[in-house]
Amino acid sequence: MAVMFALPFGAIAQDSSETNREKDNTKNEINSKTQKSMNTLNKFEFPQLPYAYDALEPFIDKMTMEIHYSKHHKAYFDNFVAAIKGKEMESMSMEQIFANISDLPAAVRNNGGGFYNHHLYWGNMRVNGGKPSAKLEAAIVKAFGSMEELKKQFSDAGKTRFGSGWAWLSKDDKGNLFVSSTPNQDNPLMSVAEKKGTPILAMDVWEHAYYLKYQNKRPDYIEAFWNVINWEEISARFE
């Protein structure tokens, strides 16, 4: 005959309290990393890749990551810094620059966008990236009806972007989520964007992001991308 032992109520409460504390500590750690990440952007420093080149295998291959980060992203950064050197823009934040992008030189728009967009892109990828927070999940359901519908709309935004560009999940000034895509290195923070908002998830659909592994099969890359979304980071950006 099995003997059942009941845990004291205090032990259950303590265990629950410790679990909540661990969740809060994890959330605070992620928020702190997100803030440091934005500080790096606004200081115009080249950010360190937050993982090894092979960390996203088999979904994104090591060689693509190395070339994409060390060559393409670094070139955007170097050209952006050169384009704003000695100008008023050196004392502005990235958001301030983007808000006035239609009045600025093309070199600032293209390279500033490339610098910023890739920084978001690296940060919103990770193998075993968890799941959306309760707040983000509720916002997804409110905006799209389901996670499946978000995936469809976001994937379609990437698949149908003609030529080079990006797909975005962003929040507007009322906190509502929306999906969009932009050409080249534009993003939803820019004054030229058709739909403006704060991006929380970025997907690069330039060929250099996937061609070595997927060749011209952009839909295959997009499907693989869903395996490396860092939902903990996306949730922190949303909240």
Image (spheres, helix red, strand yellow):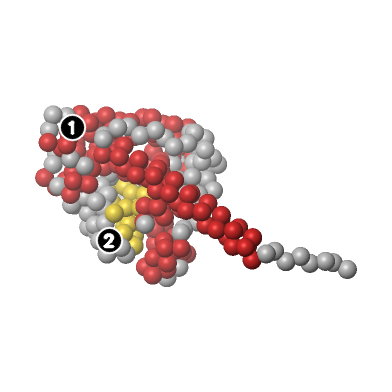
List x then y, in percent, for residue 132: 46, 58
Residue name at image x 18 percent, y 46 percent: 96
Spatial CA span between label 1 and label 2: 29 Å
**Which quadrant is the N terminus positioned in?**
bottom right
List x then y, in percent, for residue 196: 24, 57
On the image, which quarter does residue 235 sit in?
bottom left
Mark 1 in CB contact with mark 2 (< 8 angstroms): no
Residue name at image x 37 percent, y 68 percent: 143
Q: Nearer the viewer, residue 202 or 13?
A: 13
**Label 1 neighbour load within 10 Å: few <14, some 14-19, many 20+:** some
Query: What residue would you read off at disc 2?
Result: 172
List x then y, in percent, for residue 116: 30, 41
Identify the secondary structure beneath mark 1. Answer: helix
**Label 2 neighbour load within 10 Å: few <14, some 14-19, many 20+:** some
167 vs 26, left or right, is left
List x then y, in percent, for residue 188: 26, 53
> From the viewer's perspective, is residue 9 above or below residue 41?
below
Amino acid carrying label 1: it is Ala
Amino acid carrying label 2: it is Asp
Identify the secondary structure beneath mark 2. Answer: loop
Q: Would residue 38 be visible to someone looking at this image?
A: yes
Q: Would residue 181 be visible to someone looking at this image?
A: no
**Which quadrant is the C terminus positioned in?**
bottom left
Query: What residue would you read off at disc 1?
Result: 83
> From the viewer's perspective, is residue 51 above or below residue 200?
above
On the image, which quarter does residue 170 sit in?
bottom left
Q: Nearer the viewer, residue 30 or 194?
A: 30
Residue name at image x 17 percent, y 34 percent: 90
